[in-house]
Image: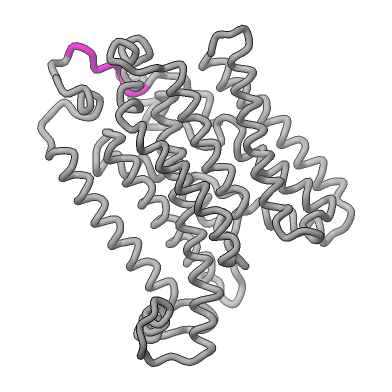
Amino acid sequence: MAAADLTPWPPSLKGRGEHDVGDTVVTLGRRAPVTVRLALSACVLALLWVTAVLVSLTMGPVDIPMTHVAGVLLAHLGFSGGDFTNTERLVVEQLRLPRLVVGSLVGAALGVAGTTMQGVFRNPMADPGIIGVSAGGAAGAVLSIALGLNRLFFLALPLFAFLGALGAAFLVYGIALMGGRFSMATLLLAGIAVSAFLGAVVSATIVLAPSNEAMREILFWLAGGLEARSWQHVAIASPLILGGVALVLVFSRELNLLLLGDDDARSLGVAVAKTRPLLIAASALVTGVAVAVSGTIAFVGLVTPHVLRLVVGTDHRVLLPASALGGALFLVIADTLARTIAQPAEIRVGIVTAFVGAPFFLFLLVRNKRRAEVL
């Protein structure tokens, strides 16, 4: 499991001659100013995301020309004109566009949460599930399906998933705070134990599912997917995800300094005892909401930060916004493949991300092992 590697990362940079504390943890050589890197990476990733969304809107069981998609979007924004049929308008506005917006929000949430967790724990193998958030969301959602609550109330499944995710996060963090002193090792080990217990709850619920239909629905949800997402899901997810992401961005400089270690961070003015739990809570919040509206989608929070760190560096003032856009881009592409690669059938998007993420995770394990042997 990702939490097993407790090696601090990156190594302390103390005493290497840098003077701008906002940048000391991100580079040992000359780089472009932070604002330039931020603007350039944001523009490139935003352009790629817009392109991916437009291409995805044209693809599916009903192929829609790009000009018709543009006409629908312009009409949706209040501009007149455009050549498209009413069916094409409904497909774009009510089926594909809300699905892509939800996918973008989920991808951004998981990308930012993964980046934050890797920084907070100084562990390159950390991801949003490290403190039991994903397992808690899965347990809550599975119980709501097994009890039939999702059929009685439209928001029951995302509500139970969100409560389960947040409950697991607070339980793990509460265990780590027992005795009045926070322990990072205890938090990681508690995350493993709570995730294992909640996994057993999910397995037991599947075995005891009241019907084959409920079992099938549970398995589909656990695989993660964005089908049937509507503007209601966008309204549910967007305030909490955007608010949580914005909160993490505010603390990007503090997250940089946490990489130096607690003692150095305190000496540079970071209230570690307050900042760390706040960042963990914000990551748990956005991950819980993402799990609530999409199911469990693995590896987005692991793959996205690693790829972008190679391109934009490790300064969280640049890396966090880039991870938000990169996560959105990654999930839009994955969902497009899930919808189109096996038409007329549809693959769950969680399966697509696992096919990409699992080999990448193994690559990271091998690389880190070789690096440790060299050191």
Q: Looking at this rendering, what residue extends furthest in the front direction?
A: 78
* Most foreground residue, 364 or 151: 151
Where residue 62 appears, x then y in whole percent? 52, 84
- Dividing the picture into quadrants, the one containing residue 65 is bottom left
In the depicted structure, whether residue 337 falls above or below residue 254 = below
Describe residue 273's horizontal placement relative to residue 370 as left or right.
right
The stretch in magenta equals 9-15
Describe residue 92's horizontal placement relative to residue 267 as left or right.
right
* Most foreground residue, 302 or 105: 105
Describe residue 374's horizontal placement relative to residue 134 as left or right.
left
Task: Give the residue displayed 56% in from the left and 36% down from the top.
Answer: 129
Q: Magenta segment, principal secondary structure?
A: loop
In the depicted structure, whether residue 85 falls above or below residue 278 = below
Q: How many marks?
A: 0
Colouring:
one colour
Task: Give the residue displayed 46% in from the left and 30% down from the top.
Answer: 279
12 in magenta: yes
Q: Quadrant of the N terminus?
A: top right
- Dividing the picture into quadrants, the one containing residue 371 is top left
Task: Give the residue displayed 33% in from the left and 26% down from the top.
Answer: 254
In the depicted structure, whether residue 32 falls above or below residue 70 = above
Where residue 135 appears, x then y in whole percent? 65, 38
105 in magenta: no
